[in-house]
Amino acid sequence: MSTAVDLAARLGRTVLYQIYPQSFADANGDGIGDLAGIAGRLDYLAWLGVDAIWLSPCFVSPFADAGYDVADFLTVAPRYGTNDDMARLTEEAGRRGISVLLDLVAGHTSDQHPWFRAAADDPDDDRFVWSDVPVDGFQPGRGARGGYYRPNFFPVQPALNYGYARPDPAEPWRSPVNAPGPVANRAALREIMAHWFGLGVAGFRVDMASSLVKDDPGHVETGRVWREMRAWLDREWPGRVIVSEWGDPRVSVPAGFHADFFLQFGGDDDGLPLRSLWNNGAGTVNLSWGEVPAWADARARGDAATFVRAWRQAADAIAADGRGGVVGLPTSNHDFTRLVAGARDAEQARVAHVLTMTWPAMPSVYYGDEIGMRYVPGTPTLEGSRLSPTYDRSGSRTPMQWGDLVPGMLGPGSPAISTYLPQDPDPDRPTVAAQLADEGSLLHLVRELIALRHGDRRLDVAAPVDVLATGYPLAYLRGGTLAVVLNPGGAGVRLPLDGAARARALVTRGCRVSTGDGGPDVVHLAGHGYAVLDLASA
């Protein structure tokens, strides 16, 4: 088995990179990114040091929700290429030690999917949640059946039926979890995953993973579905992984997933673990998420204590479960505003990258965050990107800013500019080309941090963390002797730290150390400063 496929055993050291394929690299010049474009950038990704890439959905779709409305789970959408292109991508990535994960939309299909069209004509088909009478939130059916179906997100995304955890005589459409439709849908998930595993795919990020079984207090029955999937995976496809979009790793990893991300939503704190770190708002955040004082803010109004507490609860639950697993910590994603948003600039975002690469979690870098691409307000709504009157996800989905690359070790030169969405119009927008030539750039910092994470076992997920402070600065020890001190605020801060004066500086900015006068040494960080110090050399 290739190292690019055998991913499960090395998740504790993995750096994930999310690619929004429409916007990443266009190889055929039609204005939309494609699989061949991604393949052409594998040398860049290998140079950066990432271990795995996750592609947002690339299956056949009418693209009412940017591909999260799937019409054929077994075929690559023509805009991206073919199934043979996918096989070539996984093979070429594997040669570079990079695994490929796809996005599995498990809870719904497009209303154009043949399964749904068949159900719309057959009153005995229970693959979807269907009622004969109007129900709040249900949509009018189509075809000979009539009736009403339950959507899972947008109205064009009918919910696949995995059953209801509790019956209700007033709602006769509720199926038990062992009804024929739910059983068939679970079998279909295995068939879909096995199909892509056969083409070299190493795993899946599962969209809306907690949404399967309805009216499921505590997600007990949904957890049973995923534990069943995990047992099948470990038996039939060892080394492959499933990573969830659940937002609560304390629950989802014991439910069978190898990893789950802290997200802008989910969990008992309603998304606070991530948003308390970097609530990338500044007037751009969906109002339903709410404004949260962020730790990564020049005004220094937040505190990382909420994040630390949630991470510790998740880590304890994962350890108690005993099967292993990791918490995922993303820089941003296709649904959430980027690290660089509103008043926060790329220089301030450096501290966030140091945190993601040194915390005991699996870092996930959203394409372009390594050069400081920004959330672009006012980007046109496209393919279901608008979530509310105040928030449009398209601002996080603009074309990757390659710049004027020349052919060489990192790929075939400058790709065609994707016109799927307009480029960031700022003439000073960052580019890969410009930052490659600048050793002090954010791109080189991220590469240095990834190399440090790979090269120092004290940064493995399994290595211990001892939190020294959660405010300004946030400070912690990894493996007992690797000190990380971070200051996203605009004003200088200080931290007493024994042995700091004799420590070897690994990655620093705006840092100086003074020797204590009869007391501990003191680390001084300027605004937006950081330090990774090896106390073992003291």
Image (spheres, grey):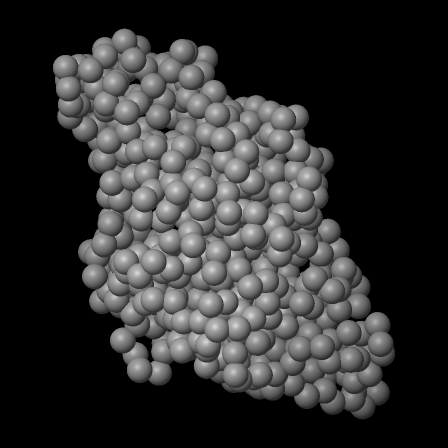
Can residue 190 be seen from the camera position used here?
yes
On screen, 162 above or below 172? below
**Front residue of this view, candidates 417 and 377:** 417
Residue 19, by quadrant, is: bottom left
Residue 475, by quadrant, is: bottom right
On screen, 428 above or below 158? below
On screen, 321 above or below 488? above
**Picture mark count:** 0
Q: Quadrant location of the N terminus?
A: top right
The image position of residue 502, as x and y in percent, is 82, 83
> In the drawing, does residue 460 fall left or right of residue 446?
right
**Front residue of this view, candidates 266 and 408:** 408
The image position of residue 402, as x and y in percent, is 41, 71
User: Residue at 24% of width from left, 50% of height from top?
Assistant: 383
User: Residue at 57% of width from left, 52% of height from top?
Assistant: 93
**Front residue of this view, candidates 331 and 483:** 331
On screen, 537 above or below 25? below
> In the drawing, does residue 108 fall left or right of residue 92?
left
**Front residue of this view, candidates 249 and 493:** 249
> In the drawing, does residue 122 fall left or right of residue 53?
left
User: Residue at 47% of width from left, 60% of height from top?
Assistant: 40
The image position of residue 273, as x and y in percent, is 50, 54
Can residue 309 be seen from the camera position used here?
no
User: Residue at 79% of width from left, 80% of height from top?
Assistant: 503
Q: Quadrant location of the C terminus?
A: bottom right
The image position of residue 219, as x and y in percent, is 48, 30
